[in-house]
Image: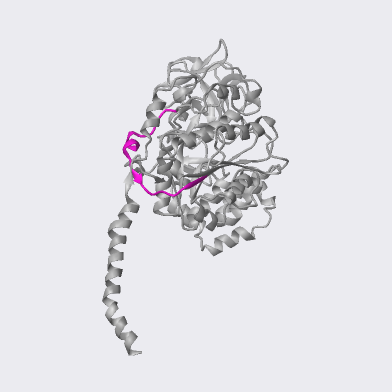
Amino acid sequence: MLVPIRKLRSTLPYLLGLFALLTCLIKFLIVPLYHKKIDWHDYDLMANEALRNGKGEHGLPIIGIPKKKAYSDNGFNGDVSDLISIHRSVPDIRNPGCKSKRYRAYLPRVSFVIPFHNEHPSVLFRTFHSILRRAPRSLIKEIILVDDASTQASIKQPLMHHIAIFNLSEVVKVVRLPERGGLITARLAGAKKSLGDVIVFLDSHTEANANFLPPLLEPIAEDYRTVVCPFIDVIDHDTFAYSAQDEGRRGAFDWQLFYKRLPLLESDLKDPTKPFNSPVMAGGLFAISARFFWELGGYDEGLQIWGGEQYELSFKIWQCGGKLVDSPCSRIGHIYRAFVPFSSGGKDGYMLHNHKRVIEVWMDEYKEFVYKKTPSLKNINPGDLSKQKEVRQRLQCKSFKWFMEEIAFDLVKHYPAVEPPDFASGFIRTVKNPNLCIGSSNEGPHSKLIVTECSHEFRLSFRKDMRFKSLEGVCWDAGSYNDGSHIGTYSCHGQQGNQLFKYDLKTKRILQGGNNRCLEHSPIDNDLVMKTCADKISQQWVMTEVNLKLLNKWI
């Protein structure tokens, strides 16, 4: 036994030396290589796209195309889409600082999962071609299109033919569901088939912008429990014009579980190219490591069709040790449909069902605020919650109180669980003819305010915006600051600006913003327009109920 020990002693210095050498190699060669940063831009493609000409190129609108069957079938003008190349260029509207950013040379490979149901062919084709054109091929593992039991023949065989003629079968794969399951089921089906290190979920009516992928992947490469959302730009549902939605907000919710947004924090504004924390994702477009997605249990399989899944996943991410960020240098355009053109597959009430599951598993005592806003939720049967509760226990997830205090700490300031009283409310009558009131062409967003018979009640809320009393989340909106511009209705954003209105009890005027502009009745066509404030009876209004104490304290 003594000889082997002597031999071991004699070789020990060599082994220690070898170990030291390997340590140095890892520390000074391999680790720096892994963290090395490069410029991922495809400058040849960008130069070629700058020279493109044609309808819709560079995200320009196509005007004057009638809304026919391709509009009613889709909630957007499919005939306009068919006029635009599936390879069209879009404007690079990133912050200028993004164009000089470098990202890790070694990034994880991606499986894109894109569910669709009866999607208009050219819109779907443009979605995955924009990925193939603007993402580095070395980072694309596959693009999985999940057909959620489409019934229209126009998308079935043409899709397979399109994949074949472009020789894309190695990278673009189609998974067909035998029956309609909805968005959540389709995403899960695609995720289960995916082979990439990272899963990027996208909607089937999107267009990726320049160099969108590296900014989505680097935060995940740094920490696999970071989930990353791109900035979502707007593709107009009528003209297919491509434009920015804004330069960033943090995702949130109100206590009816409507998706809302919070202003950026001061720390977020210091570097407009840097990813920033967001309490809640919008839900449709995001990147997540496959490892973390399945550690979280994927989506709750008890959720139906769509809705609520963004809260379930967002709460899970934050409460169970992860982080959710928006990446300003990654931009993807999205068509917001004018209306949903298809049914829920016979599963009525799915939204309430989904919300019930989410609040019972994740919101702890805060669920009572949701129940107060929507009492009917208490009577909903959420089904078996044991799997989701097991995930929460297994991962030792934090409380919702922690989430509200540490992550969504300013949410209650903007969306309080118990709202302060309104400044004023009720019918808004003209002084000239008290039988006429402010109303709208139809009760909902995207309508025009008019003077008509008294049938619509409004409230001047504590946020200083004017809302429908019977319709939550729809506000007056000044689309333009020009003299004579009309007032329409739009989804409330809670940020004042073009939705800021004030009732002056002394002059009986309704003022918009701080620009000496008042609401005026145009008696010729009963329109409502913004005009410079003046001592005119056509600018005078009476609201049914007025809170004198609050109005006198208006700041």
Placement of 355 over or under 125, stated as above or below: below
Task: Specify how the rendered protein is coloured.
Answer: one colour
Quadrant of the image occupied by residue 294: bottom right
Front-most of residues 153 and 484: 153
Front-most of residues 109 and 160: 160
> With 36 as the anchor, is 473 left or right in this view?
right
Q: Residue furthest bottom?
A: 2
Location of residue 508 in the rendering, given as x and y in whole percent from the top left corner: 48, 23
Mark count:
0
> With 102 as the anchor, is 142 left or right in this view?
right
What residue appears at the point 73 percent right and 41 percent down from the top-left corner?
346
Per the image, is 107 magenta? yes
Which residues are the magenta region? Answer: 90-111
Per the image, is 334 magenta? no
Location of residue 380 in the rendering, given as x and y in whole percent from the top left corner: 69, 50
Q: Is residue 324 visible?
A: yes
Q: Residue furthest top?
A: 524
What residue appears at the point 40 percent right and 41 percent down from the top-left corner?
264
> With 538 as the anchor, is 32 left or right in this view?
left
Front-most of residues 389 and 293: 293
Location of residue 377 in the rendering, given as x and y in whole percent from the top left corner: 65, 48
What residue appears at the point 49 percent right and 56 percent down from the top-left corner?
319
Q: Is residue 336 visible?
A: no
Placement of 121 over or under 24, stated as above or below: above
Location of residue 363 in the rendering, given as x and y in whole percent from the top left corner: 55, 54
Q: Quadrant of the C terminus?
A: top left
